[in-house]
Image (cartoon, rainbow, N blue to C red):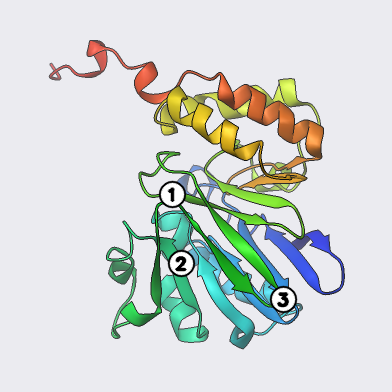
Amino acid sequence: MAVELYNDGNHICLAFYDLVDEQGEHAVQCNQFLIIDNGHAALIDPGGNMTHTGLLMGMSRYCRPQNVDYIFASHADPDIIASVNKWMVTTHAKVFISKLWTRFVPHFTTGKDYSSRIIGIPDPGMRIPLGKSEIVAVPAHFMHSEGNFQFYDPIAKILFSGDLGVSLVDHEQAAKPVEDFDRHIPKMQAFHQRYMISNKILRYWANMARQLDIEMLVPQHGQRFVGKEMVRRFIDWIETLPCGIDLMTQDAYRIPL
């Protein structure tokens, strides 16, 4: 079921929180997103094969597959883009992904050369027209992928943040916004300490993020942060978090007995 994050009649942002089949611990909860502006649509991180049919059906109320101009992929993990072959067949969309990953995307496709529809995003990011608006590909390298982007919608003022801001919850809880930031930290902390590469990178990101007008920060797993105060709390928290190589010692690099 689609959750409307924003809808002014011409510009719509939708989130899908429940499309991963109920397979317990065997499948990670993940979110998919659709932005529509004046009849033109873009999918963000459409997911793996288990999400394709549900996403196709869920978006049908809002747009047809023929209206999907773009697929935006934050990085190249299977839960982000493994269904790309099906989307290549059912739409005419172009895939935007870090230039580091363009030659990896064909490993998810079969039977046809789609290279002309795979667009590499340069490291500094770019602005991509969508309908009468645009989506901004914002650098998020090494959080957690070495070629990584977030996608900012300047009309809805939503930052689709990929693996930054992730919380480990089930799909029912994921559909609800964060209400108590302090109680939410234990659902995020271990993930970020392992998947983010270093505090240095997080500080750089925080400096950049404060320059955006963000009303909502929406990660690809778990709950979203709604309102400027909740977004500020997240930025302040992540800016000071030791993680990744900050926490590694020689004990992590020993030959197994």
Amino acid at dot 2: Phe
Closer-to-camera residue (23/241): 241
Q: Which mark is residue 96?
A: 2
Residue drawn at x 52%, y 70% as measured from the top left: 71
Which quadrant is the C terminus positioned in?
A: top left
Q: Earlier in the sequence, mark 3 or mark 2?
A: 2
Residue marked by disc 1: 148
Closer-to-camera residue (168/233): 233
Rendering quarter of residue 155: bottom right
Q: Earlier in the sequence, mark 3 or mark 1?
A: 3
Residue 219 locus on image (x, y percent): 61, 45
Residue 154 locus on image (x, y percent): 71, 57
Residue drawn at x 72%, y 82% as measured from the top left: 39
Kindly tell me whether residue 1 is visible in this rendering: no
Kindly tell me whether residue 57 is visible in this rendering: yes
Q: Which mark is residue 137?
A: none
Residue drawn at x 80%, y 31% as measured from the top left: 229
Residue drawn at x 58%, y 32% as measured from the top left: 207
The CA span between labels 1 and 2 is 11 Å
Amino acid at dot 1: Asn
Residue marked by disc 3: 132
Dot 3: within a 10 Å radius of its alpha carbon, few (fewer than 14), some, or many (20 or more) residues?
few
Amino acid at dot 3: Lys
Give the vertical position of 80 relative to 211 (above or below): below
Dot 2: within a 10 Å radius of its alpha carbon, few (fewer than 14), some, or many (20 or more) residues?
many
The CA span between labels 3 and 2 is 19 Å
Asked if the residues shown at circle 3 and circle 2 are in contact, with their CB atoms under 8 angstroms apart, the answer is no
Judged left or right of residue 59, residue 247 is left
Q: Earlier in the sequence, mark 1 or mark 2?
A: 2
Asked if the residues shown at circle 3 and circle 1 are in contact, with their CB atoms under 8 angstroms apart, the answer is no
Element type at marker 3? loop
Judged left or right of residue 33, residue 175 is right
